Amino acid sequence: MEEDRILQKQEPVWTKDFILISITNLFISLGFQMLLPVLPVFSARIGGSDAWAGLVVGIFTASAVLMRPIAGRLLDSHGRRRVYILGLIAFLICVMAYNWTSTILALLILRFIHGFGWGASSTAASTIASDIIPKSRLAEGMGYFGLTSTLAMAVAPALGLGLLGSHGFNTVFYFSAAVVFLSIFISLPISYHKPDAPPKSKLILFSQTGEAGETGIIEKTALLPAIVIFFVTMTYGAIVSFIALYANQRQVENIGLFFTVYAAALLISRPYFGRLTDKKGASFAVLPGIVFVIIAMLLIYSAKSLILFLIPGFIYGIGFGAIQPALQAMAVSKVIPSRRGAANATFFLGFDLGIGAGAILWGIIAEAFGYQFIYLLAVIPAIIGAFIYMKLRK
């Protein structure tokens, strides 16, 4: 134990490169998150119905999911810098183009392209962070890195809506573009890891051994954490898609505070469980985290006032903040540097698909049984995730 503490002192997390990649991730997350509540309003402004507004969100997720495995392969074959900066540039161009979008079809096309930029840049950012963080502190470091997205989540939606109310859509788009531009500028001095060029080989869907030279789009060693996070984020799909509608049905106002409390809990949870994972293993974070998620779902199911929504919001944040960095560290910890891009892409593929599949499934259930029943059934994927983790962990 003493030897571990000495080793951690010799391998600092907060290096120049880690600080820079964390700042850039904060900025691109701000640029991304502040658009989430604004774009459905924008789609209605240019003539889209509620169904079109949902499609504006869904088509973005679809293109991001398509891009992640491609980005993972490009990160490992062409290096981190090029993929990251090109993804950020695509992101920036799309945000600027929203200013001149006047039809719902043009918006859908732009959102589809925007998803490619987000999928590439966010996958690259996580890969770059996992390159920089010492392996002995990987879960802790990824926990700190994830806090940048958490901070953005806590302030960006309110910032976007505030700018929209006071200055209009153009100001929101220009502000989002400005922070993305800053992220490009800050990313330039980072010392990017240069993976060894793998020998030419046939492109396959899955890596066979996880060794150097493999060209599989999906990293097999990252499949378990990707599958588990898929089932966990199905519960988040229920929250992000329907919590506001459910609260309105219950005549609960100011439900936006749910996400503020959730973000505050993530700030507490991520660093603590990250260190715990590094010291004792992922199971000490993943399994308790899933228990917290299940408890939160059951409390939301029975919530009837704002405080009774905020309590599970905090519990859910503790649970999710324990699970995500532990599983992400697991996804990249056993692969060589030239496969980290594919490993991160595999992990986030499960992450995005869980949210998207959950949102679709819960929408069908809400149509048939109402919003409340969603949160009772959302316990099921969390239990499945825990069962799969315990069954396949060894």
Image: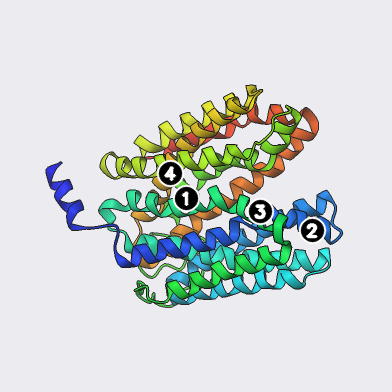
Name the residue: 60% across, 69% down: 177
Estimate the spatial distance between the alpha carbons at disc 1 and disc 4, rounded to whole Å.
27 Å
Along the line of sight, which residue is nearer the eye, 56 or 308? 308
Q: State the image coordinates of residue 76 (x, y, percent, origin top left).
A: 43, 70
Where residue 382 appears, as percent x and y from the top left, is 54, 33
Q: In the visual, does 305 lie left or right of 154?
A: right
Quarter holding residue 36: bottom right
Sequence order check: which comes first, mark 2 or mark 4?
2
Which residue matches tag 2? 43
Residue shown at 35%/63% (left/top)? 18
Residue 267 has which mark? 4
Count of residue discs: 4
Query: Helix or strand or loop: what does disc 1 sit on?
Result: helix
Which residue type does callout 1 highlight?
A: Leu
Residue carrying label 3:
162
Secondary element type, mark 3? helix
Q: How far apart are marks 3 and 2 (CA)?
A: 18 Å
User: Tag 4 or tag 1, which sits nearer the N-term?
Assistant: 1
- Residue type at mark 4 is Leu
Q: Position of residue 205 (x, y in %)?
A: 53, 62
| Mark 1, residue position | 223
Q: Distance between the residues labelled 3 and 1?
A: 40 Å
Q: Foreground: 283 or 335?
A: 283
